[in-house]
Image (cartoon, rainbow, N blue to C red):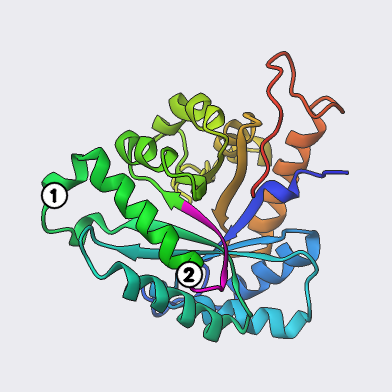
Amino acid sequence: MTTGLERLCFGTSTFVAGRLFPQKDSGPGMAALCTALQSGVRLIHSNPNLNTQWAVREVLEEIGPVDGLRHLVKAECPLHGDLEARIHSAIEVTIGRLGIPRVNALVLEIDVKRTERTDQLHRPRVLSGFFRNGARVAFASGRVDAVYAYCHGPQELAAALRVEAISAVAAQYHLTSPWAHAHLAQVEKAGKAFVGMSPLNRGALVNAFAPTVRARLRPLTWALSDPRIAALAVTMSTPDHVNEVIDTVLNSERSRSCSPYTGRTGIPRRELP
């Protein structure tokens, strides 16, 4: 029986002190992750370049083994960069820092800011080649179960969907950047899953003055409403925030039919490979 929490992924980019916020108090964020895992969240997304994986390991060592836990790990590289070295580094650093034997899903991202030949970002064959080669390197390592593609826009998304080895695509997915919503049918037709990133836009869409949790997190309810969204990655830095997000997810699930189909859409819920 599903509860809806299988769709919730704990984002770790800023939940503790790391590259982006080196002076942040890490205690509340670590307590947040502990609360999430004890409540049934089983997906964690991390990026070894952001230096927050240390806190994930400390929490896991504190609470002990978590059945069914899966790690989604970001690997970034510019187009025409040393893709093989970047991927191997992301895998090895993550395995070492998290103390895990393998990566459940490697999320490949083109490092747009460090790509020198920006004209290449608009060439479908080049984009597809990046994801195809990245998947080949990841699987050749023998330590990756699945490869996803993080996409900055429709061109990257279309390119990733053409790569058989890519089993899921990910993108920013919130009310101020809803472009991916128009492509969910395309993702579905390609037989791939979709991961929505930052449905609350890193907290910017939380209405702190709203009188109810439902009103405060309305953008999250919007993101949850489409069953084609296999997972949503939300960064949560306090136990209270975790509980509010979980309540929103569970309430969204309760509003659905008991059938695996939602409302009148007839669209089956996607699951992560």
Residue under the point 47% across and 42% down: 205
Going by the numbered disc 1, the residue's amino acid type is Thr
Residue 15 lies within the magenta run: no
Element assignment for label 1: helix
Element assignment for label 2: helix
Position of residue 38 in the picture relative to residue 105 (left or right): right
| Residue 167, image x, y percentages | 54, 47
Marks 2 and 1: which is nearer the front? 2
| Residue 198, image x, y percentages | 49, 48
Q: Say whether disc 2 or disc 1 marks the residue closer to the N-terminus.
A: 1
Examine the rendered structure and indicate whether residue 187 appears above or below residue 95: above
Q: Whole-Å distance between the Cαs marked 2 and 1?
A: 29 Å
Position of residue 258 in the picture relative to residue 22 (left or right): right
> In the rendered view of the protein, which quadrant contains the N terminus?
top right
Question: 30 or 82, which is in the foreground?
Answer: 82
Going by the numbered disc 2, the residue's amino acid type is Ala
Residue under the point 71% across and 28% down: 268
